[in-house]
Image (cartoon, grey):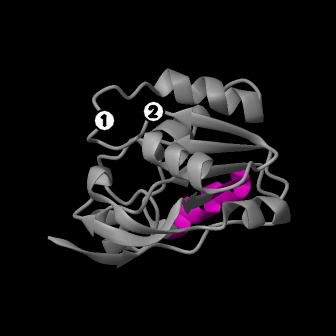
Amino acid sequence: MTGYAQGFLPFIHEDSRLLVLGSFPSVKSREEGFYYGNPHNRFWKTVCGFFGEEVPKDVAGKKDFLRRRRIALWDAALSCTIEGSKDASIRDVVMADVAALVAKIPVEAVFCNGKLSHQLLTTRLPPLGVRVECLPSTSPANPRFDAEVWNRALSGVFGERQ
């Protein structure tokens, strides 16, 4: 089913060191009401694993983890037309003002979770003035996912694996 969909507000806190920028929430995430809600998405397993923590069981636990670890989440598209959860189907994008967000918090880096978020960020918005990295999408649809690429990038912000 194709239709117009609205994304989430950014999950931020005043001392966020890292912004992870996705493209747009999946159907499962929209149903759950928070980022990376598909249990097959590798985001939570990868990032929590880097810090040596178990994946929280609920949204409240995930938010607590993000606050403690100083990680902010948002998506490049605030709203769009999308078929299911397919990035390739995204059209009519209303962009998030990532530059304004980055100007408000002490973000050292923006990790784009996949090629589409990176493309949207770098082609539709001005440079952010912080390091921007395109990392392999944690989506279950990405057969080339490599957790070690994420671990190296996280080490660049937070130091060696926790």
In this rendering, the answer to whether 13 lies above or below 43 is below
Please state the extent of the stretch shown in magenta in the rendering.
Answer: 60-72
Label 1 secondary element: loop
Q: Quadrant of residue 72?
A: bottom right
Q: Residue at x 32, y 52 (%)?
A: 87
Q: Is residue 162 visible?
A: no
Q: Is residue 62 magenta?
A: yes
**144 with respect to 9 (left or right):** left
Rendered-image quadrant of the N terminus: bottom left
| The disc label shown at residue 136, or none | 2
| Magenta stretch, main secondary structure class | helix
Task: Tell me, yes or no, whether the two marked residues, 1 and 2, touch with CB atoms within 8 Å.
Answer: yes
Q: Quadrant of residue 36?
A: bottom left
Q: Is residue 27 magenta?
A: no
- x and y percent of residue 25 in the render? 40, 63
Number of numbered markers: 2
In this rendering, the answer to whether 125 lies above or below 150 is below
| The disc label shown at residue 44, or none | none
